[in-house]
Image (spheres, coloured by chain):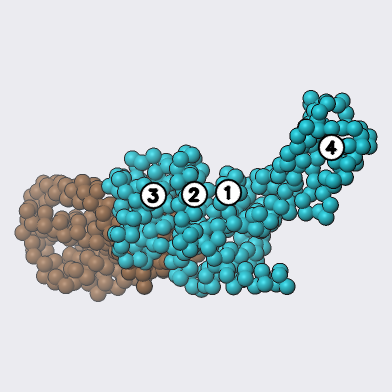
Chain colours: A brown, B cyan
Amino acid sequence: MNIHGIRAIYKFEMARTGRTLMQSVLSPVVSTSLYFVVFGSAIGSRITSIEGVSYAAFIIPGLVMLSLLMQSVSNASFGIYFPKFVGTIYEVHSAPLSYLEIITGYVGAAATKAIVVGLIILGTARLFVPYSIAHPAVMVLFLVMTTVTFSLFGFIIGIWADNFEKLQVVPLMIITPLTFLGGSFYSIHMLPPFWQKVTLFNPVVYLISGFRWSFYGLADVNVGISVVATLVFLALCLAGVWWIFRTGWRLKA
Amino acid sequence: MHSDSTARDATTDAVIDVRGLDKTYEGGFQALKGIDLTVRRGEIFALLGPNGAGKTTLISIICGIVNPGSGTVTVDGHDIIRDWRKTRTIIGLVPQELKTDAFETVWNTVRFSRGLFGKAPDDAYLEQLLKDLSLWDKRDAKILMLSGGMKRRVMIAKALSHQPNVLFLDEPTAGVDVELRRDMWAMVRRLRESGVTIILTTHYIEEAEDMADRVGVINKGELIVVEDKTALMQKLGKKQLRLQLHEPMASVPESLTDYGLELNGKGDEITYSYDTQSERTGITALLRDLAAAGIGFKDLSTRQDTLEQIFVELVREGP
């Protein structure tokens, strides 16, 4: 195994975060703080609690999940798209690196950055509202599974994209709506019965539900189903990445 | 006997061996057609060809950047598909275009390249490498801030960062000033002396003539010729004998028409082209017939075709 190669990619990607600290870390913290102000304080004053949890505390897992998904996708997609764009990808192709090692480097760095941002947001949330984590191990499990899965998804987007617009389209047009409509700011039980059923087709519902369960023991869907759904999405992303490397799609002539 | 041993030496000492390599791109363009090529250990091999001839495709396949069609390629005895990890460790590549991480520093990008190729950090080696390439003073500069020539040096430093045994230089001196070009070729010679095999493509054919041990000419995806440079120039290069006459003449006398002489505009110089490989060059007969025709000359000189002239002729004839 080319450990030095994996480390080189990982360190390179992490160093890029260091160079873009405002964009990588500060920006999600500021936007999450704004969500707390708008949703937690303004709307939360009208919705006192959901199933015994204050509204401000209720939205914390959803907000963290929103950031995790956005950060994982954007970090991983940019990480692989940029060398494609400037042409330096030739070096990765010509290096003695297996597909698994390349993915480990890029996806590992993207997931690490997303987790760091997620933890910073959790810390920031503490400034606004007290909360507890009922099942810390499950919380870490969801945190890691979600960031790895969506970093893989971002990696696929980065390979698929052939311009910067496409790089932005999926996070903005798909991830954000699915997260907003996936129960970040409400329980899906608050929806009319028909929309509750429709919402179950949104994969993000299972991630947020499972993640929230790890905090408060509250879930829109059974936590076991959430774990299975996350694993299925992880498997799909792994299959996608495996196919891309096997065929060289958008990577090799 | 001699040719057998030469062939055996070439095979046993082959560092790159390409057999029946074909490549057709998705759009149907056939970039390579049955390439057979052996590059010997420790030599400087110049791969020449016009734009779109297949040079970069061939290099990219050997380096693992482009998937091969049919055929086999071995590097130091290892198949590039089966033993890809081994072959890629051996090879360094300086691509034609300047592809760099603009926001990264010289030092970090070179360290990154070394790591990528599976080598443990060795700051002493990298320091020496950057000093050899006159980049040490720029080690903390972002690549963005460097001149084109400096960026080219960075590309070379990246390719050499993992101490490869085989180095591909794809148009390394394109857009590079004279001084840097001279430095680069001095460095290439030093690398060859240290045992590195060098395969280069260049549009400056006089460079290939000056540097290369052997030359391959590729055109429209086919390897037209692979030959020792000196032998190629002797075999395919025509030689010319120029005679400056005592008295100008209006035309070449009929008794000399068989020689195919060319008379210059002033009528005071004739040029005779001959084949160095043929048994008789015809020079003795020409001089005798000139004397018989009463044509005297005050000076003579010979000139051989350059590699560039041979190359142009080969490409024009085509595969």
**How far apart, in angstroms, are the residues tagged by discs 2 and 1?**
10 Å
Q: Amino acid at mark 2?
A: Trp
- Chain of the residue displaying label 3: B
Q: Earlier in the sequence, mark 3 or mark 2?
A: 3
Q: Which residue is mark 1?
A: B210
Badge nearest the viewer, 4 or 2: 4
Q: Which residue is mark 2?
A: B185
Residues flagged by tags 4 and 2 on a common chain: yes
Q: Earlier in the sequence, mark 1 or mark 3?
A: 3
Pointer 3 local density, CA inside 10 Å: few below 14, some 14–19, many at least 20: some
Badge nearest the viewer, 3 or 4: 4
**Res. B261 mark:** 4
* Rendered-image quadrant of the N terminus of chain A: bottom left
Q: Which residue is mark 3?
A: B133
- Chain of the residue displaying label 2: B
Q: Earlier in the sequence, mark 3 or mark 4?
A: 3
